[in-house]
Amino acid sequence: MKAAISINQLSKTYSSEHPVIALEDISLQIERGELFGLIGPDGAGKTSLFRILTTLLLAEKGSAEVIGLDVVKDFRKIRSSIGYMPGRFSLYQDLSVEENLKFFADVFGTTIKANYDMIKDIYVQIEPFKDRKAGQLSGGMKQKLALCCALIHKPEVLFLDEPTTGVDPVSRKEFWGMLKQLKQQGITIMVSTPYMDEAAMCDRIALIQSGKILSVNTPQQIIANYPYELYIAKAESNYHLLEKLKTQENIRYVYISGEYLHIIFKGENKIIDYPDVEIKMGKPSIEDCFIQLMNNESN
């Protein structure tokens, strides 16, 4: 059986006075029924890739298939077989919740009733507000409505471009719970996010930066492949400690992460020349792996 999404050496450049490379030789295979995460900061190329895969943007080089269909030649068939939730809320603000949902069902030649089983677990949470205009919903409710509209025609593949950006932590957690339920229904889900902690929710992830894929694997395996001993340190002024450690020759990398500094030493000398420092071994996170891979790419 063919992969749900197959990407082969895709490249995209935005031409201007100073051309910007959005994607550079991207290749990925996403299996059917997989919950796949594209993890990277703003400007990494996530949205450009999503727009190519959803037939809204053309690449200059390479090819891509979604459920065995070419994104250029078969764009009409692809559009009827996928659900897409763009990063910005794109529903009709002046229409009610119910009117938005009915509109999207009509566009795909179906009805809310025919496919209600697909959205019911999500829709019951916004049904009390079905007569409220979409523009008056909270961020979490807008997100649930947009997801319902993307699912109303029972798509085979669901593309979610940074769906939890700007959403409160409780709604973020709820949203990922919804994605787990959708995966159990056999839908292939490709989701992008700048939040490194959301990587653990995915079956596999691709770390992307400056249009390049740094690594593709399960979150657990990416962490297992981390090549260094990680130390974490804390002082009364982490900023002053950071500036001091940047001058020490035995430090390979040092950066602030939350309330600690994360430190990678060179060789066996693990002495810090700074008073009253709390230091101990740490466990790497996806964010640590991303920084390490990004540093390797730039060196």
Image: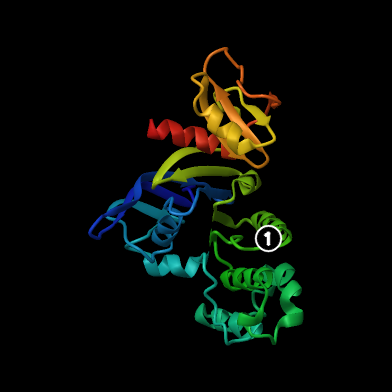
As helix, strand or loop, the secondary structure at mark 1 comes to: helix
- How many marks overall? 1
Q: Mark 1: few, some, or many residues within 10 Å (few <14, many ≥20)?
A: many
**Does 82 appear above or below 296?**
below
Residue drawn at (51%, 37%) of the image: 291
Q: Position of residue 104 (x, y in %)?
A: 55, 79
Q: Position of residue 160 (x, y in %)?
A: 54, 60
Q: Which residue lies furthest to the top in this view?
A: 268
The colouring scheme, among rainbow, by chain, secondary structure or one colour, is: rainbow
Res. 111 visible in picture? no
Is 288 situated left or right of 175 in this image?
left
Q: Along the line of sight, which residue is nearer the eye, 271 or 262?
A: 271
The quarter holding residue 177 reads: bottom right
Residue type, mark 1 in image: Phe
Looking at the figure, which quarter contains the C terminus? top left
Q: Along the line of sight, which residue is nearer the eye, 56 or 259?
A: 259
Res. 57 visible in picture? yes
**Does 31 appear above or below 275?**
below
**Does 120 appear above or below 254?**
below
Q: Where is residue 33 in the image (x, y as percent from the top left)?
A: 59, 51
The quarter holding residue 298 reads: top left
Residue drawn at (47%, 70%) of the image: 80
Q: Where is residue 269 in the image (x, y as percent from the top left)?
A: 57, 13
- Which residue lies under the disc numbered 1? 175
